[in-house]
Amino acid sequence: MADGRKVASTRSMATRRKRLGATRKRKLRSSTTSVKDVVVAQLDEIQRSGGDGVLELGRGTSLQVSSLDKMYFPKDGFSKGDLMRYYATVARAISAAIRDRPLILKRYPNGIDGPSFFQQNVKDVPDGVRTARVKTEGGRTGERIIGGDLLTLLYTAQIGTIATHAWQSRIGSQGFADTTTIDLDPSDDVPFSKVVLLAKHVQEELDRAGLHGSVKTSGSRGIHIVLPMPTRTTFDIAAGVAQRLAERVAARHPDLATVERSIRARPKGSIYVDAMQNAEGKSVVAAYSVRARRGATVSAPLRAISASSVARYVGKT
């Protein structure tokens, strides 16, 4: 906080907060101003005013935010406020991708250079944040955060979650997979151009099988190919589809691809075609998610999803 703000009187601070609140309410009522723009403007103002405040999200919902000026990506100059502004901007798109999906949180309370930890079960979340009791490993149940709305998305960022990892099932049909994912994971010495080439070969295999999928960058060094599954596809079948495709690609292109799980045993310069993240309860980073990496890279979608012909292929597996 600037020196001038430090010496501001309690009365003047209270007056400013009152005026700011009135301005937010007027903006939220405006039919010509998007919620995204209103929220970003509020985050800007809160960060300029010291980094702590309350976001008014409309329809009676709000979120207490704090430390917006904390550097989450210090070498790139991106703050917690920058992360929250980004998620507010892409909220509609990412919420569609994670709607009704349980989330797994990896929290970085002090940014990517600080310690991190995983959180799955939650309690005592703010009013309005979506949670549900879901079945977890070993038949147990746990209260999990459920994606799909702006308040929940911004709350996860507020508590230090940088990347959004979502299950490949939704709470309405938890025991069934609605997507299965192939992750092209290159060795350190493989240029990204070869990952792109292998992704094209995967697409050729999909075409031969009469399948359609979506492609996105992983936000790291790889590419994800995501296939929609027919209604009530079990996780065993979904995982089998991905594994069968991975093995076919590796067999056709042994100079590029491998399904060898052991890093030491993989051929030098190869790309691991990973189909092993498709079990129930495992998660995949969502499209539009920021990654906890230098540069604040994003998992960027490259093509829209089409679900046609998948049912026929599942029937053969």
Image (spheres, helix red, strand yellow):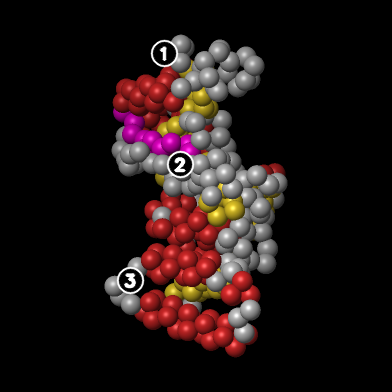
Between disc 1 and disc 2, the foreground one is 2
**Toward which corner of the image does residue 32 lie, by quadrant?**
bottom left
Instruction: Identify the mark nearer the N-term, 1 or 2.
Output: 1
Which segment did they paint magenta? 210-219
Residue on which disc 2 sits: 299
Q: Would residue 42 be visible to someone looking at this image?
A: yes
Please provide percent x and percent y for residue 74.
59, 48
- Could you classify mark 1 by the number of other residues whose Cα lies within 10 Å: few (under 14), some (14-19), or many (20 or more)? few
Residue on which disc 3 sits: 33
Q: Which mark is residue 252?
A: 1
Q: In the displayed orientation, state which residue is furthest to the front.
A: 3
Q: Would residue 251 be visible to someone looking at this image?
A: no
Cα gap from disc 1 to disc 2, whole angstroms:
27 Å
Instruction: Identify the mark nearer the N-term, 3 or 1.
Output: 3
Which residue occupies the foreground of this view, 57 or 192? 192
Mark 1: amino acid: Arg
